Amino acid sequence: MVKQANSVLSGFGTTIFETMSALAKETGAINLGQGFPDEDGPEDIRAAAAKAFMEGPNQYPPMMGTPDLRQAVADHNHRFYGIAVNPDTDILITSGATEALADCLMALIEPGDEVVLFEPLYDCYLPLVLRAGGIPKFIRLDPPSWTLEPERLAAAFSDKTKLVLLNTPMNPTGKVFNLDELEQIAEQVQKYDAYAVCDEVYEHIVFGLSRHVPIATLPGMGERTVRIGSAGKTFSLTGWKVGYVTGCTELIARIAKAHQFITFTTPPALQQAVAYGLNKGDEFYEKLQIDMQSKRNYFKYGLENAGFETAACDGTYFINVDIRSIGFTGTDEEFCRLIITEAGVAALPVSAFYMSDNAEKHFVRFCFCKREDVLSDAVTRLSDFFSGK
Ligand code: PMP
Ligand code: GLN
């Protein structure tokens, strides 16, 4: 008889990203489901990787990351947020933000610890928390404003809270937590002597008057926070899987204990290229922000013209629409299946990002980090389909 696999992980199906991308491929639909840009990031960064692949380094780099990349991450922290860290001890390079999250959760959670999570939440959070033995405590955010309700925040924390997992700018909502909300979260974290694990992979994709503030910069939070970034998002190279974790020396040392047994290292040639990328001038980061904001504006306007009400979107490359606004009465999942097969556009049901009972079922997420002609084609297809053309 075959023995059972681990029950926590085998209880989860294939991720919605993989499922919808496969369906989009099969049907030839425009894929605005899974989040990835349709244009690769800067050529000079890719050239730096190609050079490093040919000339080396290609053997195991130091476990904590190459010195050049750790220095570049430290400089980046200082340039954008005034965070001063020691590149030798306070930075860990990982194989993507996903590995960074796994490292942090494996390293910090003891079975039975409570972990505060915001719903809707990114897909790998809950499986990793549960696999580490954590007990999830959800704080629900509701569309279209995604506002944090103080009572829900307070109710999620207790003496058993080990950490809060905070994603800002937030996938799938497009929410950027404001200073007031961050202060409220920081207060709870300190009250219960907990940690904050912060997934900030969309740190440079923030629109209008919103600002990305790492919670690590708030008073009293530096020693209890780790901040996770990803080259995949910042340089539009999602397949590269190079992540970076910044925190105080003691916390990084603990998290490195997980990293050394999970991947141990990350391809050094990619690390060299990402170091080069992070050192780019401010104009690179400004252009990324401007380009993404113009895509957001273009797509949002197109959707609204087609009759959709959109939810607030102040950051990331995702925008959500209320499917009831065009008279659709079914669930978000039914809507996604309908538009992929009948209109030729793929989106993701937001209910897939709610793990507790009572999932929100009337919103779908579109990814807009695509060329304008692609976004325009997608809007035309949706508009034609729903107007019966
Ligand atoms: N966190 C969030 C919120 C994301 O959207 C993503 C993108 N897939 C990740 C983590 C994972 O990043 P990476 O590809 O660097 O592992
Ligand atoms: N982060 C991307 C998204 O939310 C894709 C992640 C993935 O495919 N695992 O769409």
Image: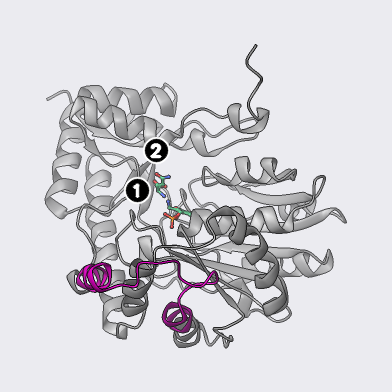
Q: Quadrant of residue 140?
A: top right
Q: Position of residue 309 (x, y in %)?
A: 36, 43
Q: Are marks 2 and 1 in contact (CB under 8 Å)?
A: yes
Rendering quadrant holding ligand 1: bottom left
Instruction: Magenta stretch: give its range.
Output: 45-73
Q: Nearer the viewer, residue 361 or 34?
A: 34
Mark 2 Cα-neighbour bin, 10 Å: few <14, some 14–19, many ≥20: some
- Does the image show residue 375? yes
The residue that label 2 is drawn on is 17
Magenta stretch: includes residue 202 = no
State the separation of the CA atoms marked 2 and 1: 8 Å
The color scheme shown is one colour
Q: Position of residue 303 (x, y in %)?
A: 26, 44
Q: Which residue shows up at 24% across the image and 34% down it? A: 345
The image quadrant where one finds the C terminus is top left
Compared with residue 182, is residue 109 higher up or lower down, i.e. above or below?
above
Q: Position of residue 57 (x, y in %)?
A: 34, 72
The amino acid on which the numbered mark 1 sits, given as a three-letter code, is: Gly
Q: Which residue shows up at 61% across the image and 81% down it? A: 89
Q: Which residue shows up at 62% across the image and 45% down it? A: 128
Compared with residue 227, is residue 74 higher up or lower down, i.e. above or below?
below
Q: Is residue 243 left or right of residue 343?
A: right
Q: Position of residue 227 (x, y in %)?
A: 57, 69
Label 2, ligand 2: CB separation under 8 Å: yes
Numbered tag placed on residue 347 in the rendering: none
For marks 2 and 1 on the same chain, the one whose residue lies earlier in the sequence: 2
Label 1, ligand 2: CB separation under 8 Å: yes
What is the number of callouts on the image? 2
Q: Nearer the viewer, residue 11 or 256?
A: 256
Numbered tag placed on residue 35 in the rendering: 1
Q: Is residue 76 left or right of residue 45?
A: right
- Does the image show residue 170? no
